[in-house]
Image (cartoon, grey):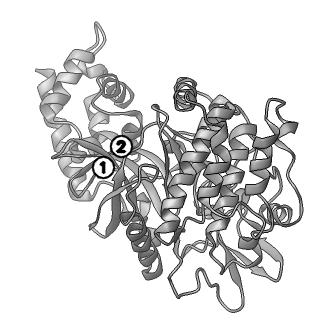
Amino acid sequence: MVQPLQQSLFCRALVSSGLIAPERLEQVVAQGLPAHATVADLDEALLAKLLVDSGDLNAWQVEQLREGRSRFRLGPYLIHDAIGRGGMGDVFQAEHELLGRIEAIKVLPKRKTTPDAVARFAREVRAQAQLDHPNLVRVTFAGADGGAHYFVSEYVPGLDLRRLVRRFGPLPIEAAAHIGVEAAKGLEYAHRKGLVHRDVKPGNVLVTPQGAVKLTDLGLAWRLDDATPPDQGAGTGRRVVGTSDYLAPESIRTPNRVLPVSDVYALGCTVYYAITGKVPYPGGDHAEKARRHLNEAPLSPGAFRSDLPEAFVAALWNMMDKDENRRTPTAVAAAEALLPFVTPGSKASVARVVDVALRRRTAAPDEREDSAWDETAGDSSAVEQHGSNARPDVASQGTDPVCAADQETVPDAKPSETHEAPLDRGVRWTVTAAVAAAGLVGIAALATAWLR
């Protein structure tokens, strides 16, 4: 049984990955083999189980190793897990090996390393790096390793608002109000710094087990003082950018206008989702959602629950007014409108909701949030709009991405179910011929040690 194990892609990748020292591997096998079993009974599945049970590897790392991906280091960071996908890359949980600090790393996939995409990625890094606010995810470092561009931000435990609602259901009023107020504070700070988020949605609102709230993913953010027209398409086409469930009408009509008040509309839609468990315009493709944002009022939140005060619903309607001149004008005003529904126990209420949601392993079925329309180089995921008719080139959906063409939706999927390995296949986190040969030698040596 040793020879098949030697030839296993998993074992070769394991040895070359450096995730576990040979001495520790030998110890895990010796301690973990079932009674009456010998090393001759060891196969790939059993070895993987022993390593996960011992805590030396997690299920995501095992999955990557089985695919032959063996590189789990990026600069000084050891990649632990895939945790999400943003507008310009995949996001991983990682540990700084010297400092022992857990952080989040966003990596620009190799398939997107065109000059335009790298410039956009750098723009996102610079946008986030200038922000220092408790309601915004903080960037701590940026760099490149082997052609892979990445930046590092604080790791926020908990759930994004979309997964929180999917697992828990519609939130208590005081919890939804707290989340809305805190998100509005982060937006107000970004707006004062001259940045418009352009992709406010539940998937970009992170909620911690302590009830803290942080906005993330400024991959589509735009500086108000930037003289370059944003997202100009080829020819006369104009590209609608954002997520179709949360797009302000003016962002659809005139995509090249970037307004802070459009973030207020998206925040109103986000709070609507938090208290109803539904997006404002369920069903339909991107074009249908755009038409309804322009022309139709959503169902009243009161149609889904009877405990909402009229003043709360009125605050939402003001934030979601289709006319930006009548809409709640600023993020500060949005926070003030929601503040009367925040109680001294609101933060604790949010913490309880997160605790319940984290203990629930499956999500309740609901209307899936649409992915974004985006002009990312190499992806036909933008909507070219001529006049008032927006037509998406790609009608795929995602968990919380801003690149529609990038992924499929698996309800409340673990990141490993929807995302590729670190840096994706384009960067080839795989075993080279030389490393594979070294892996065979290493496994053979370990097998000899186990048999002694």
The residue singled out by tag 1 in the image is 70
Q: Is residue 27 left or right of residue 53?
A: left
Q: Quadrant of residue 360?
A: top right
Q: Is residue 372 above or below residue 169?
A: below
Q: Secondary structure at mark 2?
A: helix
Q: Determine whether label 2 and label 1 are within 8 Å by CB.
A: yes
Residue drawn at x 44%, y 68% as measured from the top left? 124
Q: Is residue 175 above or below residue 255?
A: above
**Residue closest to the eye, 232 or 379:** 232
- Amino acid of disc 1: Ser
The residue singled out by tag 2 in the image is 65
- Amino acid of disc 2: Leu
Residue drawn at x 57%, y 53% as measured from the top left? 184
**Residue closest to the eye, 431 or 255:** 255
**Residue closest to the eye, 7 or 91:** 91
Q: Is residue 26 left or right of residue 297?
A: left
Q: Is residue 120 left or right of residue 70?
A: right
Q: Quadrant of residue 350?
A: top right
Quarter of the C terminus within the rendering? top left
Q: Quadrant of residue 371?
A: bottom right
Q: Earlier in the sequence, mark 2 or mark 1?
A: 2
Local crowd at mark 1 within 10 Å, few (<14), some, or many (≥20)?
A: many
Where does residue 151 sit, x and y in percent of width and height? Answer: 34, 61
